[in-house]
Image: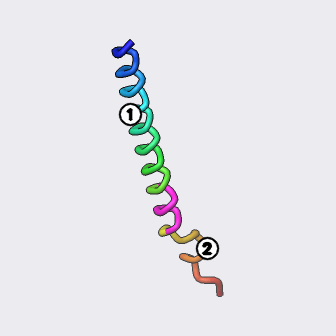
C-alpha cells in the first residue's frame, strides 16, 4: 500500500513538472510574439 502512495506522489510530481515546463514554454512563446512587431510596422507606409 505504501509503495502505491509513493508511486502516486512521484507521478503527481512528474506531472506537475511537465505542466510547469509547458507553461514556461507557453509564456516564452507569447512574450516572443509580443516583442516581435508585426511585419507591417517594419515597412513604412508612404
| Image coordinates for residue 19, horizontal then vertical, percent | 46, 40
* Residue projecting furthest to the top: 1
Residue 20 is one of the magenta-drawn residues: no
Residue placed most toward the observer, 4 or 40: 4
Q: Quadrant of residue 40?
A: bottom right
Residue at the spot of label 2: 40
Q: Residue at x 49, y 51 (%)?
A: 26
Which numbered circle lies on residue 32?
none
Residue at the spot of label 1: 13
| Image coordinates for residue 13, horizontal then vertical, percent | 38, 33
Magenta: main secondary structure equals: helix
SS for callout 2: helix
Q: Residue at x 44, y 33 (%)?
A: 15
Q: Residue at x 43, y 45 (%)?
A: 20
Q: Residue at x 39, y 39 (%)?
A: 17
Residue placed most toward the observer, 42 or 36: 36
Give the foreground label among 2 and 1: 1
Amino acid at each position: 500500500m505504501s509503495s502505491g502512495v509513493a508511486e502516486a506522489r512521484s507521478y503527481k510530481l512528474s506531472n506537475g513538472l511537465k505542466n510547469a515546463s509547458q507553461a514556461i514554454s507557453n509564456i516564452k512563446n507569447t512574450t516572443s510574439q509580443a516583442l516581435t512587431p508585426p511585419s507591417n510596422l517594419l515597412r513604412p507606409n508612404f
